[in-house]
């Protein structure tokens, strides 16, 4: 397995694979890998001849008061995990390799990015779209793998690829959870013991919402109040949002029909966690 921090070298390696007729899968990450990331890597391994994992904590997608400096990083550990999974190439650039000092070109969209996490993280999705566009240009892969854990991000990337005609197929992968239900996340490392226990309120509330919908409830307001009431029982939890939206447009819906995303963001202490379910 090769690790490269260089854009030209990475592009050359991937282009050579393409010239040999090999299928390439890309898994974009910010590192500090866990089973959620590994599930994406395994899917990419199963569906491609070569797999590239990018590890880049992208400064552009963090707001000024967010956790860019404290975001966990451990390249050696990540490299070991990737090697075990049979990854062929890690792309791990420095911020200065990705962003020239006079960088001024951005990829953005209206609508989808303004809802859910976009309300409290106004620059986040512009940063995500810009870096993912750059990765798609640097690594001309056939398939790119994204988790449903970040469902709004997945919807935005799918839309960006459609609207801007990127020649890549986006593959969405299910959420991987801890045994007790907490969605795996690199940010879970911020939680102390008490907070880790309190964080279960997210998956617990969504499980109740899922049961409601399975029993035929279609009214978004009722689903939202069910989730809100459960989250209120946890003193360490503070709700950022609870929303029921169309998965394609990310616009709130009053009634569940088609593919609907039930998404929540909740602060546990100082840590902001997200989770969701999608009803077909
Ligand atoms: P991150 O490193 O947090 O930017 O995540 C990189 C990719 O892994 C994104 O596509 C995430 O949606 C995905 N991912 C993160 N956590 C999980 C999880 N628990 N299950 C599935 N995919 C995940």
Image: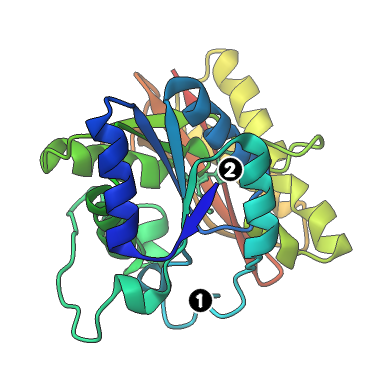
Q: Is residue 40 above or below residue 100?
A: above
Q: Is residue 251 visible?
A: no
Q: Nearer the viewer, residue 279 or 126?
A: 126
At a point 51% along the width and 52% down the height, the residue shown is 2
Give the position of the C terminus as an image quadrant.
top left
Q: Residues within 10 Å of mark 1 (few under 14, many from 20)?
A: few
Q: Name the residue located 39 percent from the left edge and 34 percent from the top edge.
A: 25
Q: Position of residue 30 (x, y in %)?
A: 51, 59
> In terms of secondary structure, where does tag 2 sit?
helix
Residue extending farthest left:
164
Q: What number is the disc on residue 37?
A: 2
Mark 2 near ligand 1 (CB under 8 Å)? yes
Whichever of callouts 1 and 2 sits on the residue coming sooner in the sequence is 2
Cα separation between marks 1 and 2: 22 Å
Residue 237 image offset from top left, x and y in percent:
70, 60
User: What is the tally of numbered marks visible in this picture?
Assistant: 2
């Amino acid at each position: 397995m090769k690790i490269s921090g260089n854009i030209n070298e990475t592009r050359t390696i991937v282009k050579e694979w393409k010239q040999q007729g090999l299928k390439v899968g890309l898994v974009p990450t910010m590192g500090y890998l866990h089973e959620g990331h590994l599930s994406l890597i395994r899917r990419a391994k199963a569906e491609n001849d070569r797999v590239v994992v990018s590890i880049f904590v992208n400064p552009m997608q963090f707001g000024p008061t967010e956790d860019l400096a404290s975001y966990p990083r451990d390249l050696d550990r990540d490299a070991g995990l990737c090697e075990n999974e049979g990854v062929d190439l890690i792309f791990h650039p420095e911020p200065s390799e990705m962003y020239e000092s006079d960088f001024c070109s951005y990829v953005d969209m209206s609508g989808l990015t303004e809802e859910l996490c976009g309300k409290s993280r106004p620059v986040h999705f512009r940063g995500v779209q810009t870096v993912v566009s750059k990765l798609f240009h640097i690594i001309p892969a056939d398939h790119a793998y994204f988790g449903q854990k970040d469902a709004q991000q997945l919807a935005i990337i799918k839309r960006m690829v459609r609207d801007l005609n990127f020649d890549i197929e986006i593959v969405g992968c299910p959420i991987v959870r801890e045994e007790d239900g907490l969605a795996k996340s690199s940010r879970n490392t911020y939680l102390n013991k008490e907070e880790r226990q309190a964080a279960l309120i997210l998956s617990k509330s969504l499980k109740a919402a899922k049961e409601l919908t399975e029993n035929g409830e279609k009214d978004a307001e009722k689903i939202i109040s069910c989730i809100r009431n459960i989250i209120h029982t946890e003193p360490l939890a503070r709700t950022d949002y609870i929303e029921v939206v169309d998965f394609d447009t990310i616009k709130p819906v009053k009634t569940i029909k088609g593919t609907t995303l039930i998404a929540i963001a909740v602060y546990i202490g100082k840590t902001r966690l997200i989770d969701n379910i999608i009803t077909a």
